[in-house]
Each structure stands twice: as structure tokens, then as C-alpha cells.
Image: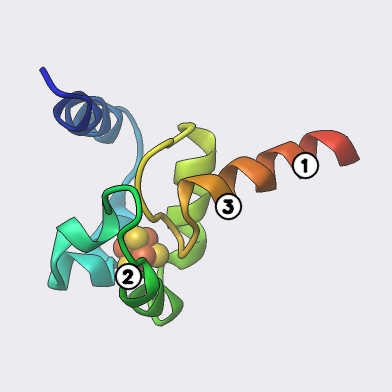
Amino acid sequence: MSTHTQHLVDWVESILEGDLSWQGDALCAQTDPDAFFPEVGDDTYLAKCVCRNCPVREECLDFALEHNETIGIWGGKSAKERYWMKRKAKEIG
Ligand code: SF4
């Protein structure tokens, strides 16, 4: 099983565990989902533009942070940006 496939399996399992009603309003569901799971070096500008206008951006970002999502754009933030957000939060306490 590839890393990407394993991630999707993990993601589906996490969906089954919590309240994900906010995903019904996700703008990315109306676009190309691959844009939100870019390969290394791919441009993320368009995905982030969609996120900026998404009504559930905050819920999406909270979900990604809580579930330690390490792949993809969530709440308008890349995996690297989420990593630094969590690291900064730990430093602040
Ligand atoms: S914030 Fe972005 S990734 Fe999250 S649900 Fe909205 S469009 Fe999708």
C-alpha cells in the first residue's frame, strides 16, 4: 500500500470517529481534490485560494491539527505550516 493510499485509509477511519458535519460545507468538495494533496514541489496557490473563501476553514484547520495530518492542505495551511504552528504553540505553552 502506498503512503498516499495509507493516508486516505487513515483519513477515512478518522472520519468515522468524530463529528465531521462541517465537511458538508467544504468548498474543496466542489473542486479537484488532488489540488489539496499536492506532490512535493507542486503549486498550492489555487488550493489555498479556495480555502480562503471556505466557510469551514477554522473547523478544517482544527481537525488537521488535532489529527496530526501530515499530508495535504487543510484550512489553508500546508503540512509544513501546520508543523510550525504546532511547534510555536508548544513553545508558548
Ligand atoms: S478550508 Fe480548504 S481544505 Fe478545508 S474544507 Fe475548506 S476548502 Fe477544504
Q: Position of residue 72 (x, y in %)?
A: 35, 48
Sequence-wise, the earlier of marks 3 and 2 is: 2
- Circle 3: residue type: Glu
- Circle 1: residue type: Ala
**Up/down of 51 relative to 88, above or below:** below
The answer to which image quadrant residue 86 occupies is top right
For the point 28% across and 58% down, the residue is 36
Quarter of the image with the N terminus is top left
Q: CA distance from mark 2 to mark 1?
A: 25 Å
In the picture, the disc for residue 19 is none
| Front label number (2 vs 1) | 2
For the point 52% across and 36% down, the residue is 66
| Front label number (3 vs 1) | 3
- Circle 2: residue type: Ala
**Viewed as shown, does residue 84 lie left or right of 74?**
right
Quarter of the image with the C terminus is top right
Q: Secondary structure at mark 3?
A: helix
Q: CA distance from mark 3 to mark 1?
A: 12 Å
**Viewed as shown, does residue 7 lie left or right of 71?**
left
**Foreground pick, 24 / 89:** 89
In the picture, the disc for residue 81 is 3
The answer to which image quadrant residue 33 occupies is bottom left
- For label 3, being within 8 Å of ligand 1 is answered no
Q: Position of residue 80 (x, y in %)?
A: 54, 46
Sequence-wise, the earlier of marks 2 and 1 is: 2
Q: Secondary structure at mark 1?
A: helix
In the picture, the disc for residue 47 is 2
Q: Residue furthest top?
A: 1
- Neighbour tally class for label 2: few under 14, some 14-19, many 20 plus, Cα within 10 Å: many
Q: Which residue is mark 1?
A: 89
- Neighbour tally class for label 1: few under 14, some 14-19, many 20 plus, Cα within 10 Å: few
Ligand 1 lies in which image quarter?
Answer: bottom left
